[in-house]
Amino acid sequence: MDPGVDEALTIVTVLYRSSDMLTQTLPTWVRSAEGLPVRFIFADNWPEDGCEKVVAGWLDEERYEYLPDSSNPGFAAGCNRAVAAARTNHVLLLNPDVWLPDDALARMCAAIAEDPGTPIAVGLAMHGGEYIGIDVNPVSLFIDRTATAARGPLGPSGGAAVFPTELFHQFGGFYEHLFAWGEDADLAYRLYASGYRTRALDLVLPHAGGHSVEGDNKLQGFRAFLLARNRLLVAARVFTWPLMLLAMPVLALAHLALAARRVRQGLLWPFLRGVGRGLAESPAARRQWNGKRFGFASLYSYLTVRRA
């Protein structure tokens, strides 16, 4: 590719303990990008892992940017930092544990050309199922949307998502206080409430999932904390007050059921800390978003409109 040609798409990847996984997946990204105007930005939140050497071994220096941050500010902040460095009209957020078929990036670029202003949810194959984007759930508020769902996605999943770069910036990107988990749903609810719809691309990518916390009990506890806290923070930020009042008893019952599961997993204490922090931080989280919120009208639209 001629380095003087403006790239059409930037692949944004946040790394954390990802060296072994990136060694497997990056070669498939390089093959898929062959002949396409695609650039790469890596935000590395665990630089001592050796990912920089993996990237340098597969990509020419002028084709990528490497942004290390040993303080580990989280997935949401890493994405925002990398997107801020992008010089293209579109970004593809892509987890490091996702493999790309040879034609994947060509299909994404074609979808962008068809409708440049619309976010795109790209599918992921994981946990024995296939999922495209985010779905609304009455108990957990948001879940992975099955590929066969009749409704379109609420928004893209952060593991494989195409955003117009300007639109991502317009909505402030991901809410960084969430750190990791739920930041894509938070943005999806805000986009939907503001009238932006997401296209589901009929493309499913193999996804390992969970590589950054696998085998680490401390990180498993931190994940349990985030899962409990962030669900409450997302609800506080994105729901209108009437919908919030309806959701509160449902959330309470859901957290009781989740507490029983965390007891069996030995993760009750971090879960309870997450619930407490979520309740305490919800007012401040709500004040930090002043745009349109997801209410009954948005919910009715989402539940009744079928995908094209």
Image (cartoon, rainbow, N blue to C red):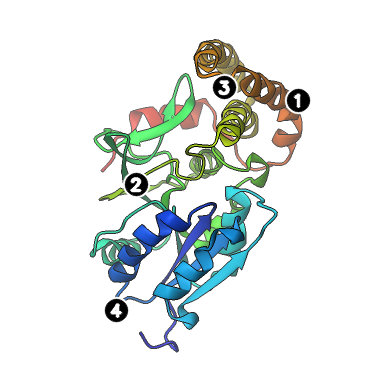
Secondary structure of residue under mark 4? loop
Q: Residues within 10 Å of mark 1 (few under 14, many from 20)?
A: some
Describe the element under mark 3 as helix, strand or loop: helix
Q: Which residue has dot 3 on it?
A: 243
Of pointers 2 and 4, the one earlier in the residue sequence: 4
Vertical placement of residue 155 versus 43, above or below:
above
Q: Which residue is mark 1?
A: 280
The label shown at residue 290 is: none
Task: Give the vertical position of 178 relative to 255 (above or below).
Answer: below
Q: Earlier in the sequence, mark 2 or mark 3?
A: 2
Give the amino acid type for the residue marked by disc 4 in the picture. Answer: Gly
What residue sits right under mark 4 in the picture?
35
Q: Name the residue rendered at 67%, 51% in the picture.
A: 73
Which residue in the protein does label 2 denote?
Answer: 207
- Element under label 1? helix
Image quadrant in which you'd find residue 183? top right
Whichever of callouts 1 and 2 sits on the residue coming sooner in the sequence is: 2
Residue depicted at 64% across the width and 31% down the height: 233
Q: CA distance from mark 2 to mark 3?
A: 34 Å
Report the Cα–Cα distance between label 1 and label 2: 35 Å
Circles 1, 2 touching at the beta carbon (< 8 Å): no
